[in-house]
């Protein structure tokens, strides 16, 4: 069979073998880890853009933030959707919806809080998928 890392033919010692050597196995896992962290870089870049918008003052200054959001508010609705998302794809859909929602539907820094929650949730999901 072919090694998943270097593509060379090898005789598997076990039925579950995917790599020709320990070296190839660990180098393949490192590559996967880098792919995941580059995903985080993209999210962080987007988050910086959002924070930049908030700092520039084009969004109303924070007044009071509800610590227990009502599901009837836009913010509460998104927090619920974020918590209910169980796959990367579901969460991406919620993020897209969040980004597409008019900012005036959120009070104070709720938009930023919702976005932060979605980033945290995505991190959780990616961690769970890896194990
Ligand atoms: Zn190999």
Image (spheres, grey):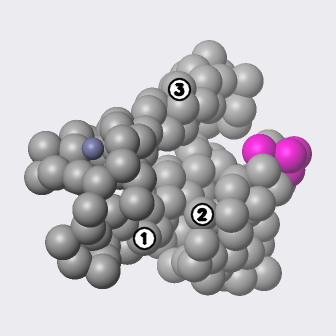
Q: Is mark 3 within 8 Å of ligand 1?
A: no
Q: Is mark 1 within 8 Å of ligand 1?
A: no
Q: Main secondary structure of the magenta part?
A: helix
**In the image as oriented, which residue stretches furthest toward the top?**
56
Q: Is residue 26 visible?
A: no
SS type, badge 3: helix
Check if mark 1's residue and mark 3's residue have beta carbons within 8 Å.
no
Check if mark 2's residue and mark 1's residue have beta carbons within 8 Å.
yes
Q: Classify residue 118 by image quadrant.
A: bottom right
Q: Residue at x 54, y 31 (%)?
A: 42
Mark 1, residue position? 129
For the residue carrying disc 2, how many other residues have a C-alpha within 10 Å: few (<14), some (14-19), or many (20+)? some
Indicate the quadrant containing the C terminus: top left, top right, bottom left or bottom right.
bottom left
Mark 2, residue position? 88
Q: CA distance from mark 2 to mark 1?
A: 9 Å
Q: Is residue 99 magenta?
A: yes
Compared with 58, 102 (above or below) is below
Q: Residue at x 85, y 50 (%)?
A: 101
């Amino acid at each position: 069979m072919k090694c998943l890392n270097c593509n060379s033919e090898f005789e598997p010692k076990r039925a579950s073998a995917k790599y020709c050597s320990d070296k190839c196995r660990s180098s393949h896992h490192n590559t996967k880890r880098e792919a995941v962290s580059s995903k985080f870089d993209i999210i962080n870049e987007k988050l910086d853009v959002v924070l930049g918008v908030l700092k520039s003052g084009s969004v109303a200054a924070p007044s009071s933030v509800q610590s227990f959001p009502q599901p009837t508010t836009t913010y509460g609705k998104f927090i619920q959707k974020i918590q209910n998302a169980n796959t990367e794809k579901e969460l991406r859909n919620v993020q897209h919806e969040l980004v597409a929602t008019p900012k005036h539907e959120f009070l104070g820094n709720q938009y930023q809080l919702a976005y932060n929650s979605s980033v945290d949730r995505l991190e959780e999901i990616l961690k769970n998928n890896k194990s």
